[in-house]
Image (tube, grey):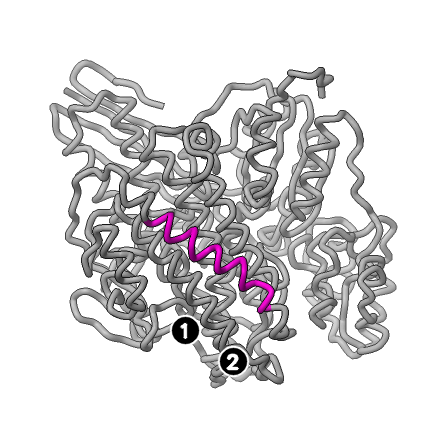
Amino acid sequence: MSSSPSGFHPTIAVFKFASCDGCQLSLLDCEDELLALAGAVRIANFQEMSRATIEGPYDIAFVEGSITTSHDLERLQRIRATSTTLITIGACATAGGIQALRNFADVQEYTAVVYPRPEFIRTLATSTPIAEHVRVDFELRGCPINRHQLLEVITAALAGRRPAVPRHSVCAECKQRGTTCLLVAGATPCLGPVTQAGCGAICPAVGRGCYGCYGPAEAANPSALGDRLLAGGMAPADVTRWFRTFNSAAPVFTKESLRHDPQRQR
Amino acid sequence: MTHSASDSERLLEVHDLARVEGEGALRVVVREGQVAEVALNIFEPPRFFEALLRGRRHDEAPDITARVCGICPVAYQTSACAAMEQACGVRVEGQIAALRRLLYCGEWIQSHALHIHLLHAPDFLGCQDAVGLAQIDRAAVERGLRLKRTGNLLMETVGGRAIHPVNVRLGGFHRAPTRSELAALRPHLEQAVEDAAATISWVAKFDFPNLEQDYLFVSLLGDGLYPIEGGRVGTSHGWDLSVEEFEPLLVEDHVERSTALHARLEGRDPYLTGPLARYALNSQRLPDEVRRAASAAGLGAVCRNPFQSIVVRAVELLYACQEALRLIEAYQPPEPPAVEVPPRAGAGTGGSEAPRGLLLHRYEIDAEGIIRAARLVPPTSQNQLSIEADLRRVVEDSLQLPDPELTWRCEQTVRNYDPCISCAAHFLEVSVEREA
């Protein structure tokens, strides 16, 4: 983005595609910083917050949601063309979201199940991450994103530097919290070893295995974990389900889910 | 965005409705001084939850359906748990049920505080958004943000996370918070009670357009308490049914302009769910102190003016803060924190009061707990016909307004409902067209 001499108020826009709104809500959840932030930037387009909109170009565009319609694909391309920096927020935008389960099924059949008049519905056969279609400058993970990480990303973007967002696994956060390893000590299935940190290891902290909502960690080895889950007595179909939730379109999760999929679709 | 299509026609269009959750648009056509067309278009892309749930395990439904909506995930988790527990013949009672209600109070507090201060109040005060509102009344916005933060803090303490809580499971919770963890919330909630009372006085002074609608109200009925996490279904025409008796009577149809379905009772009668309905059918269940605050704000036992929903929401906000304090006072950590919910073949229905209205789930599962069929009926699709009926009246009553003001009034009318479009799409677009 452009440099920020004092007095310069970069324009920020927030756009939504197929999603639950939870990640952009995280911006409104920055209760202590929201008014200060609104003073430091020009909020040019943030539909969930304001009816006032300013036409692009935008210095920073935050994009929530996945691409599931051809209309949305065109809209995304216009947003990319008019934004200096494009940052995706959340699992839908970075890995397809829960709606990417259609990628393993027949969307025509899905439409017929949900809608009495399927002919009214226009949708793509797949739910795909933003980076499959346009250049993305930074991907912030999570279902939902963590608002402290979001503030770091905004601060970094305003300063023109790379955000300090760790790529290591949830395991490191369990160690930091002093949470006893569920997988080792309790034989509780846990995706922590292959899942990117950022949530604060909140699931193991309540005695529950990580369910992978931040997507794959850097250099994750899902097949080693998949084998371990099988050895612990989990059925292959359940291993598939575990790798196929909110980040099922992340390639290494897709691959591991297919390795155990009894139906071997796609 | 508004334009006049010709001298004889007024077309008011809002392509991207703001300050609502999700993607919708509004279109109103006025021809020769008569409202010819009112359409709320929902172009939120469909995500096919009812389809993708099939083949998943019963214990995954709370986390998967939470992702329908980032603003009311606890509503989805609670209705899903209730439905699955019923399917499996399990009842959840005592402190586990109380803890669910406490978590849900957190969601009501954050959602109502958000909608009142950041999304709805700016309309009444002529502001584009909360940032503009802060320029004329910073203390009010700060109060709203403080309330919202308390709601989130409560959700984080009980649920492990404010958006898509991780501590909820079938049968209860993964871990029960300690008494001292909850006690730490007390000062925040005591401040919130004060803030909510101030919010009621603040919104009560707003200028409300004159509109009384003859709604058919539908809401859960609280068992001695104001309804939040469950109960029987009541209507203003006298029904008193269990959720499983009620669910089949709710018939949805599909129109071309919307990825949300339109719900009617017995396929015939439009109805209203949400704060006005809850209040109309349950105001006698509010504690005296909250009822006095409602009365001081000018509310009777029933409120039929949709613009005053902001006052009812503020009353419910006060209630949720007080109720959270009461639940924390009485709390004893349940041991174990969850009852087991082993699968069995069957069907179950669950309902709870999301901040914006009744949310029903129904599932059929097999003996292994695999979901075979799912139905989710969110509040906004139930309210879609009422929203359009309100819009028609508002336009008829306000034709003297110039297009920009009339369009804004229409947007405000939609925002009266705190609509959640991500939920309903399986839902919202505003345009007004005038032909003189």
Q: Main secondary structure of the magenta part?
A: helix
Q: Which residues are magenta?
A: B182-200
- Residue nearest the observer in this picture, B181 or B373: B181
User: Which residue in the structure is indicated by mark 1?
Assistant: B349
x, y percent for residue B99: 52, 73
Secondary structure under badge 2? helix
Structural crowding at the residue carrying mark 2, measured as other residues with C-alpha within 10 Å and reported as few (<14), some (14–19) or many (≥20): some
**Tag 2 subunit:** B
Which image quarter holds the C terminus of chain B? top left
Drawn side of residue A9 relative to residue B297, left or right: right
To the question of a shared chain for discs 2 and 1, the answer is yes
Tag 1 or tag 2, which sits nearer the N-term?
2
**Tag 1 subunit:** B
Residue A4 visible in the displayed image: yes
x, y percent for residue B189: 50, 60
* Three-letter amino acid code of the residue under disc 1: Thr
Residue at (43% x, 76% y) in the render? B348
- Compute the Cα span from label 2 to label 1: 22 Å
x, y percent for residue B195: 43, 51
User: Which residue in the structure is indicated by mark 2?
Assistant: B95
x, y percent for residue B323: 42, 67
